[in-house]
Amino acid sequence: MKENFPKPEKDNAEIQQAPIERSKFSQKKKSFFKSTAIQSLALFAALSGVYGGVIGYEQHQEKQRIQEVQKEGLDLENISEDFDVKIIISSTSHSIVHIKQIHRYGTLEKMEDEGIAPQVIRSQKEIEKLINDLSEQNGIKDFFDEGIAVDSKGKSEGLEFLEMLRDILDKKINNPNVSVVESADALVDLETLTLTPHEFDGPEGKAEGANAEALYTIKIGWEDLLKNINDAQAPERVGHKKSVSKKYAQFIESATRMGMFQKLVDGFQSDRSLVVNNPLIQGDNVYIMGAARKLYLDGKINLIPAETDEGNDEGTRAAHFTHDPNSDPNFQKTVTERNDIALARITSDPQFKNMKFIPVIFGAGHNFEDNIKNYNKGNPSDTLGLIEITPK
């Protein structure tokens, strides 16, 4: 027969003691975590103070460098409100002012399909403001522009094309010795050229860019011509006939006498409307050609070739075949070589010696720091500085 023995009961003292010991453990645990949290916060505060101090020191140093450049004649303090401004390398001789842009790549249709067009437009509109500031407030008129290149003989077809367009405005539209009819004919001839895009040489995107430049010139031409006619009709409003070319007054008189004035003006306005509504320059699309080229055609600045045809073509090929520009060594090698070519072009230009600040409009993916450091090693008595300006 199996006996049932009663289970031993725990000692009352043990039962009472157990929760006390657990309570002590909980208190120690809380105390440990509290102490650790305080130490962590103290460490974080210390590190934050150090990190904040470093940032504050760097910001102070950058502000001092900007003030030094300000004293030398370049107004960066006002510019820095709308742009990120960094002085990468200081120099008392010359400084490259790298204006970092997002530029056109391929056709308008391609850029719109890939969602790049709005970025290009936003970047170029900001750069237009910057170039105007540099030109009007700092007296800088000469800009080295990416894509404006020279061949092996030093000839630049891109720049010659732009010069031809600006000549039409200066020598045909606003020339008092050329009749209004001749002015209109010059615009019609250029308009005919834009209707046959195959006339523009080069890759599809570059050809379209040249076409846009021509269309913009026609737009400016018609607007100037119509404005001058309007001013000539109301000389008292614009001051006197001296402010208007005599040729426009003569045009109004002879065209009115023949009963053709309104018909001719309507024809000019119709031609202007056709050009303005072209997608390549419609609205903000005009900025896709590049702010520098737009301002050149507006007669506000001068452009200087910043690279060679060979280097530019190689860059175009590398960009076409790369999948990740930041990690592709072949692409980065091409970028470095183009930077070296740009520096060689800039430092060999006849105007270089007289330029303290040298604006260079190049893509945001270019970084001239290492190239300039290498240049300075070989030219210790005439070093180059580097200032980077990027639209925010």
Image: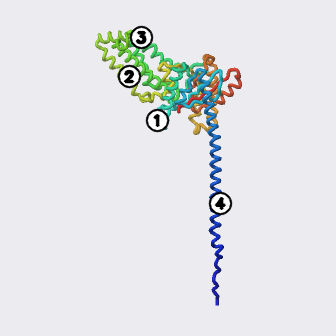
Question: What residue lies at 48% left-to-right and 20% top-to-bottom?
Answer: 297
Q: Quadrant of the N terminus?
A: bottom right
- Percent position of residue 121, x then y: 48, 31
- The local crowd at label 3, few if under 14, some if 14 to 19, many if 20 or more residues have their Cα within 10 Å, is some
Residue 28 numbered tag: 4
Label 4 with label 1: CB-CB less than 8 Å: no
Residue 272 numbered tag: 2
Q: Which residue is mark 3?
A: 178
- The local crowd at label 1, few if under 14, some if 14 to 19, many if 20 or more residues have their Cα within 10 Å, is few
Question: What residue lies at 63% left-to-right and 34% top-to-bottom?
Answer: 58
- Percent position of residue 340, x then y: 64, 27
At mark 2, the secondary structure is: helix
Disc 4 marks a residue whose amino acid type is: Lys
Q: Which residue is mark 1?
A: 112
Disc 1 marks a residue whose amino acid type is: Glu
Q: CA distance from mark 3 to mark 4?
A: 98 Å
Q: Which of the pair 210/13 is nearer the observer? A: 13
- Percent position of residue 333, x then y: 64, 33
Label 2 with label 1: CB-CB less than 8 Å: no
At mark 3, the secondary structure is: loop
Of label 4 and label 2, which has the lower sequence position?
4
Label 4 with label 2: CB-CB less than 8 Å: no
